[in-house]
Image (cartoon, grey):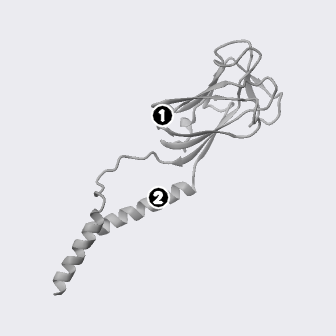
Amino acid sequence: MELRSLFTRLATCALLTASVAANAAVITVDNTDAGFTSSGLNISTYEPGYFGANYMADTRNSVGDFGMWDPTGDSEWVAGIWKVEMLWTSGPTRANNAAVTIDSGSSTASLVINQLLNGTVWNDLGEYSFDLSGASVMIDDSNSTSGQNIIADAVRFTFVSANPAAPTNVPAPGTVLVLLGAAAAVFRLRRQ
């Protein structure tokens, strides 16, 4: 009975994994959404190719400007591994060294992105393991030189997989083979 239960659990896990992968959540947080906060940024529609109604740009002459996207208010948000992509508009005054901080809720990763390149397309920032709360992506002008501006438009989060959990009640490697061998031996003894 234990062996049947083990196989049933394995089959259920495989089906759940396939179901989650087939229905991967995609959450896009735009600069006009409730999950976006900023300081020192101005609304603009000057350059085309933005997501939604507009985008935001800093003033190029002040320090401390930022935009932050928080996906945790979305009903589809779960802890797990998410692919993060950012979209910005093209333009000759874009920062070539914009600072991006990805906060997983328990750790942070820092990136430097060149917004002079790849405007108007989704730019892959990587895959990160996020907690249920405290997750965010922030862009700021801490690296930018005078005359350059950071662009805060939209960030897209695509669910990849659940966070790997520590195994509980998992048999040691080879246990299933030992159990199958023991069951075969018992079966042979009973037949004799």
> Quarter of the image containing the N terminus?
bottom left
Instruction: Please state if 41 lies on the left or on the right of 24 as rendered.
Output: right
Q: Nearer the viewer, residue 91 or 43?
A: 91
Residue 96: image location, x then y, percent: 72, 25
Residue 177: image location, x then y, percent: 29, 68
What amino acid type is highlighted by mark number 2?
Answer: Leu
- Residue at 75% x, 33% y: name it: 117
Outermost residue on the top side: it is 62
Specify few, some or many for label 1: CA neighbours under 10 Å numbering under 14, 14-19, or 20 or more.
some
Query: What residue is disc 1 on?
Result: 133
Q: Nearer the viewer, residue 134 or 94?
A: 94
What amino acid type is highlighted by mark number 1?
Answer: Ser
Specify few, some or many for label 2: CA neighbours under 10 Å numbering under 14, 14-19, or 20 or more.
few
- Residue at 80% x, 36% y: name it: 49
Kindly tell me whether residue 1 is visible in this rendering. Answer: no
**Picture disc at residue 16:** 2
- Residue at 35% x, 46% y: name it: 166
Give the quadrant of residue 66. Answer: top right
